[in-house]
Structures are given as structure tokens and as C-alpha cells.
Amino acid sequence: MKRSYFIIISIMILFISKSNASDPVGLKSVGAMGGILVPQNTWNNGLAVELQSELGEIIKYVFLVSQIGYWHAGQNKEGQDLTYTNIYFGSKFIGFFNTKPRGFYAGLGIQYHIISQDELLSGIDVVENEIVTRNISRVGYSIVAGYLLKLKNVSFSFEPRYTLLPGTEDMITISIGAGYLLP
């Protein structure tokens, strides 16, 4: 696991240091996104919130966006309310289909997820149904697509994303967002 973190960080540093872009890497915009979380198996639909900052073009037409987010979902099982929360941070690499950073885009992301999920224990060994909270952490991988509308000082976006979380439930988020373009 430590080896995969080392490889990921090395690749990110390599991309940033070998930038062949017209703009230097730096903070270009900050923004927020919100939307729905669609789990792929057991949990009900939930809430997805994210803060992000665009750091600029790392290679021609490919932009680096850092992100910090929160997911919340729940379910009712045997009369008990169970919750799923996920705090994550990471980066996504998005490429635009035209020469300017606006319009349709697609990309890949990598995040570190800190997950807390309730489980209901029942059976012969348990006298009463008991809720146990399980805390896990995972490295997640995202496939991203979307549309970015840039105006003079603000930008608006629509972004569906599929996140693979090995060993847990994969998630789909559908978000809309707004950002402030820094001078």
C-alpha cells in the first residue's frame, strides 16, 4: 500500500515539474460543488458536497484540480437507521475537448477516502440488534465527465462522476458547482 502511494505522488510531481503548458501551475480558481450521491448497492441516495481549486494546466489541455469532499447516505434496516459518511481529499486531472478550458471535459481522479459506516449485528450470538460503526480508509479512483461554463469572473459546472472504491461500494455523484476565477 505504501508503495502505491509513493508511485502516485511521484507521478503527480513528474506531471507538475515537466509541465509543457502555456500557464504556470498555480491557484487559478476556487469553488464548491453539491449534488446527489448514488451508491451502487446497499445504501440509499445521499448528499455529496465538495470544495475544489483549479491549479492550472499541467500538460497541454490537461488541468489539475484539487478537491476535498464529503458524502452522506443512509438506510433503514430492520427498523434501525444506519448511516454512511465519507470524507475524502485528492486530485483530478481533466482534459478539455477544445483549446480553451471551457466546454465539455473528461478525466480521471484519485482520492484518499476516510469512511465511517454503520452495520447492524444480528444473529444467534447477539441478544438484541446492535449497531456497530466500522471505520475504514481506501484509495479511490474516479472517472469524470462534465461541462464547464466560464464567464468573466465566475464559472459554472455540471459533473457526473463514477468512483471506484476497492473493497467497498462504488459510488456515482451528480453535481453542479460554481467557482470564482482568481486574477
Image (tube, rainbow, N blue to C red):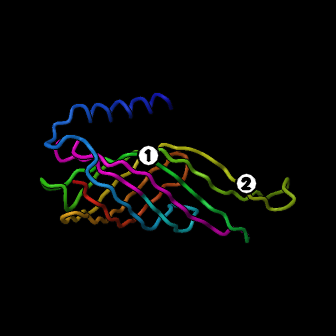
Q: Quadrant of residue 10?
A: top left
What percent of the width, then of the height, locates residue 138? 52, 44
Give the prevailing secondary structure in the magenta stretch.
strand
Foreground residue among 113 and 161: 113
Q: Residues within 10 Å of mark 1 (few under 14, many from 20)?
A: many
**With respect to residue 78, does 14 lie above or below?**
above
Q: Amino acid at mark 1?
A: Gln
Chain-order first, disc 1 or disc 2: 1
The residue positioned farthest toward the front in the image shown:
183
Foreground residue among 30 and 140: 30
**With respect to residue 43, does 106 lie above or below?**
above
SS at badge 1: strand
Decide if residue 97 is on the left or right side of residue 79.
left
Q: Residue at x 38, y 33 (%)?
A: 9
Q: Amino acid at mark 2?
A: Val
Q: Report the Cα–Cα distance between label 1 and label 2.
A: 26 Å
Residue wearing tag 2: 132
Decide if residue 127 is on the left or right side of residue 15.
right
The residue positioned farthest toward the right in the image shown:
127
